[in-house]
Structures are given as structure tokens and as C-alpha cells.
Image: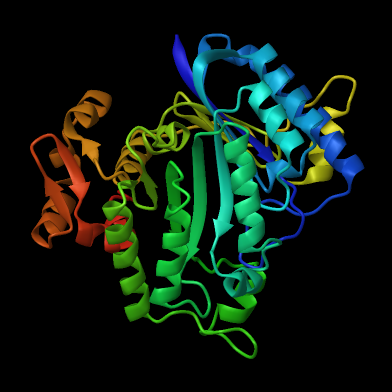
């Protein structure tokens, strides 16, 4: 039986953070309820095309999925179980934000089969959290984390963001120390990206900060922060298995690995992306359109256009710039098996260029980024775009 990952998008949150460009925002409770009903109808309608697939990973993301009630969480996962063949050992992750976690919701998650919780902390410094526009404090995060532990969740991820306005290497070190002291199984440590269309872009898009907003760290501080992250987490038993992800042995996120290794995944909900057998499509991004289509007597398709097949060139490009995000790199043998051409035949000049610069290494089986290569990964990965 073929394998499948499932992503379910919940586009709601209590308040939009100043750096966030995700498809999400606050909404009244009746709209959230309509969305849950529409989401279940979409899964019921689309499930027929996945009869030959077994679901191995599920990721409920957003937004803030934990704005849902326990009953709504139960219904979504009950619909998933009814519509799809799910592996009894499937990894099922739900994102949660501090301030929205309750004992009742966690109990609903446990009963629904959730095996993994991802908590958005971002920073252990209350001043930095306020600058980001987060709705919680460190103390409220700590309370939410303990609720997750008390509910029996051993697999907990904590999301962190570095290179924040006003952040120093010392304050980042403190955030890491406070986080690791809790012994989560997994830590995602991303660097802040100033995205167009966000409030942060208006402030930082053309400079380093104005008025009440602290300056972004300079390049030297960012470099020091990166070094601290790698060295400190490694010293505490967290293996870097992807550019921004660290895990205790055996706690790697299987769902995210599926993306990086170009496995099949089906997305449900507003704006969700799918990629099955090298065919890709996206859902509508306007909430009113999505709801109205699913509320018809016969639900309409919520796809934004027709699925399109990836060319062989696009498949090779994705194999390299997604696979090289993982520290184990890309298998030369798998590349040859998938495309009928060796990696050297397709990318020989690029491989040699970055090997000579000390940014790539080859051990006879895999091509992978070196530590230096990870530091300038965007530069290296761009060279694997054949066009």
C-alpha cells in the first residue's frame, strides 16, 4: 500500500503576530464552527482518491489549531479516521500556542490519537515576545508546557525564533537554556525572516528599525547566535537533522521529513498544498469562497485551479534543494534510480564548484552540506535550480 502524509490547516489565531505572513487571522466562534464543518466535508469528498494509500503522518497546523474547542478537535480527527486508512503507529502532530492550551483540549487530543504536540514559544524573554506581538508570556508558556506533560505527551516540540529585534547572543543563550531545561524531545530553531505584507516589513523592510522598535541584530551577532545554537543543542544531546531542526534520538518529525524527501502528501483546508505522485495543487485562499463551496448541497472543489504535473527537471531540482536541507544529504543512488541519470551528469559543475569551496561534501553515497555550507545554504541551494 502506498503511503501518505496529511496536512490539515486551521487558519485562525487569537491575534496576528507582527512577523507572521501565514494564511491566518482571528475570527468569531460561529465562523470557526462553519470552517470545521466545511473541513470535514472536504475530507469526506476527497478521500475517495486515496483508497490505495495508508496515512503515516498527520499534521494539524495553522494559524493556531488550539483555538478550536475539544469537541471540534474530536470531530476533525474522527472524520480523518473514518475517511482514511490510518497506520496505527502514525505520527499525529498538533500545533498549539500558549494561552490556548487547556486540560480539556489536551484530553480530546489524547483520545483522538494525537502523539506529538508542537508548542510555539519563539522566545523565553518577555520583552522579545512583546515586540513580536505574541499573546503569551514565558510564564504562560511554562504553564502550557506542563499541562502537555501532565496529559501524557512525551513527544513535544518547541518552536523558537532567533535574530529578533534587540536580541543579543546572551539573551538567545538564555532562551535556549530555559527551553532545554524542560527536556522537550524536539526543538525547531528558525531565524527571523522579514516577509512582505507583514507589520514587521513596514518597520524593517528598508532598514534595521525605527522609533520604539529595536534594531535587528547585525551580521556578527547573527553569526554568533547560529554558533551558539549548534554548539549548545549538540552538547545537550539534540542532533541537528535539518537546517532548522534538532531532535533527541528517534524524535525527528516524520511529517516534515516526508516533505523534504518528497513523499506524497494531501492538504485539506484553506490554502493547503498537496503533492501526490508528482502532481501538485493548492486550495483556495479566500475563506468566504472556501466556506460557500463546502456548504452547498453538493460540495464544490476547493482547488485553486487544476493539478499540474511536475516536469522531470522540477523533480530533480526539488530533490536537491529540499533534500540538502537535511544533514544526511541526498543519496546519489536514489537520484540515479529516480531519474535514470547520475547526479554528477546533471549537476557536475555545481557539485564541483561547492565542493571546492568547502560547502558540499561527498562520502561516496550521499552529497551533503558542510557546516559552512549550511551557514550559506540559500546561496548553495539556488545553484541547483536548472533553469
Asked whether residue 228 appears in the rendered view, the answer is yes
What scheme was used to colour the molecule? rainbow
Kindly give the residue lying farthest to the bottom in the view shown: 211
Residue 70: x and y in percent read 77, 32
Residue toward you, 340 or 163? 163
Residue 148: x and y in percent read 61, 40
Q: Quadrant of residue 39?
A: top right
Residue plotted at (40% across, 33% down): 262
Horizontal relation, residue 339 to residue 54: left or right? left
Residue toward you, 116 or 322? 116
Residue plotted at (56% across, 43% down): 118
Q: Quadrant of residue 355?
A: bottom left
Up-down relation of residue 127 to residue 338 (above or below): below
Horizontal relation, residue 9 to residue 246: left or right? right
Asked whether residue 20 appears in the rendered view, the answer is no
Residue 305: x and y in percent read 65, 36
Up-down relation of residue 130 to residue 369 (above or below): below
* Marker count (numbered): 0
Considering the image in quadrants, where does the N terminus appear? Answer: top left
Residue 277: x and y in percent read 45, 23
Up-down relation of residue 239 to residue 275 (above or below): below
Residue plotted at (52% across, 84% down): 215
Residue toward you, 275 or 163? 163
Residue plotted at (36% across, 78% down): 221
Amino acid at each position: 500500500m502506498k503511503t501518505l502524509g496529511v496536512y490539515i490547516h486551521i487558519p485562525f489565531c487569537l491575534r496576528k503576530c507582527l512577523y507572521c505572513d501565514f494564511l491566518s487571522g482571528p475570527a468569531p466562534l460561529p465562523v470557526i464552527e462553519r470552517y470545521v464543518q466545511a473541513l470535514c466535508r472536504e475530507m469526506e469528498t476527497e478521500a475517495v482518491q486515496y483508497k490505495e494509500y495508508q496515512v503515516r503522518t498527520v499534521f494539524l497546523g495553522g494559524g493556531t489549531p488550539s483555538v478550536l474547542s475539544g469537541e471540534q478537535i474530536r470531530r476533525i480527527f474522527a472524520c480523518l479516521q473514518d475517511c482514511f486508512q490510518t497506520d496505527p503507529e502514525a505520527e499525529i502532530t498538533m500545533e498549539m500556542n500558549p494561552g490556548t492550551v487547556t486540560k480539556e483540549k489536551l484530553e480530546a487530543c489524547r483520545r483522538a490519537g494525537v502523539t506529538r504536540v508542537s508548542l510555539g514559544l519563539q522566545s523565553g524573554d518577555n520583552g522579545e515576545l512583546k515586540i513580536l506581538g505574541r499573546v503569551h508570556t514565558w510564564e504562560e508558556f511554562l504553564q502550557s508546557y506542563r499541562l502537555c506533560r501532565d496529559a501524557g505527551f512525551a513527544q513535544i516540540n518547541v518552536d523558537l525564533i532567533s535574530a529578533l529585534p534587540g536580541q543579543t547572543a546572551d539573551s538567545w543563550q538564555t532562551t535556549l537554556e530555559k527551553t532545554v531545561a524542560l527536556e522537550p524531545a524536539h526543538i525547531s530553531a528558525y531565524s527571523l525572516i522579514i516577509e512582505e505584507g507583514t507589520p514587521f516589513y513596514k518597520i524593517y523592510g528598508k532598514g534595521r528599525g525605527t522609533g520604539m522598535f529595536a534594531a535587528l541584530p547585525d551580521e556578527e551577532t547573527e553569526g554568533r547566535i547560529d554558533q551558539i545554537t549548534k554548539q549548545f543543542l549538540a552538547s545537550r544531546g539534540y542532533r541537528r537533522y535539518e537546517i532548522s531542526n534538532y531532535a533527541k534520538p528517534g524524535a525527528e518529525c516524520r511529517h516534515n521529513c516526508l516533505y523534504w524527501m518528497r513523499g506524497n502528501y494531501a492538504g485539506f483546508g484553506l490554502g493547503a498544498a498537496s503533492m501526490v505522485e508528482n502532481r501538485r495543487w493548492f486550495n483556495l485562499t479566500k475563506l468566504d469562497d472556501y466556506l460557500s463551496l463546502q456548504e452547498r448541497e453538493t460540495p464544490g472543489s476547493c482547488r485553486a485551479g487544476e493539478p499540474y504535473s511536475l516536469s522531470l527537471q522540477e523533480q530533480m531540482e526539488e530533490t536537491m534543494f529540499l533534500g540538502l536541507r537535511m544533514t544526511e544529504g541526498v543519496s546519489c543512488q536514489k537520484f540515479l534510480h529516480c531519474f535514470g541519470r547520475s547526479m554528477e551528469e546533471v549537476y557536475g559543475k555545481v557539485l564541483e564548484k561547492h565542493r571546492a569551496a568547502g560547502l558540499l561534501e561527498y562520502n561516496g553515497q550521499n552529497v551533503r552540506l558542510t557546516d559552512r555550507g549550511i551557514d550559506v545554504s540559500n546561496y548553495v541551494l539556488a545553484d541547483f535550480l536548472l533553469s
